[in-house]
Amino acid sequence: MTSEVLLDTCVRLDLSIAPERIGEEALARLIDPTTILLASAALAWEVAMKTRAGKLLGGDRLLAAWDRQLSDLGVVPICIEHQDSLRAGGLG
């Protein structure tokens, strides 16, 4: 059975920098070939902002290899439309 996982910033960073921080069960799901990993442009934006603010050591190297690393991880990019943001903002 295929499942989809939307990567958040912490998990994305941990996958590249410190996979040992990810719990055993979560890591197993992330590397399972039946799991489709998804990432939005908001993820790249957040990493770029953290890097520019000096809050992400090694962020420049991570951003330089961004596309290759996402491809290596098999991540599928997704688009966020205005309506998606408005709906998400109304959740609570």
Image (cartoon, grey):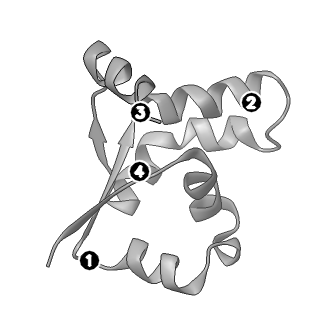
**Residue type at mark 4?**
Leu
Give the secondary structure at mark 1. loop
**Which residue is outermost to the left?**
1
Residue that carries the numbered disc 4 in the rendered image = 70
Mark with earlier residue (3, 2): 2
What's the residue at 57%, 57% (across, down)?
11
Q: Earlier in the sequence, mark 1 or mark 3?
A: 1
Q: Earlier in the sequence, mark 4 or mark 1?
A: 1
Q: Which mark is residue 33?
A: 1
> What is the x, y in percent for residue 28?
44, 83
- Amino acid type of the residue tagged 1 in the rendering: Pro
Picture layout, residue 36 above or below residue 89: below
Under circle 2, the secondary element is helix
Marks counted in the figure total 4
The residue singled out by tag 3 in the image is 91
- First in sequence: mark 2 or mark 4? 2
Q: Which mark is residue 51?
A: 2
Residue 59 is situated, as x and y percent measured from the top left of the image, at 72, 39
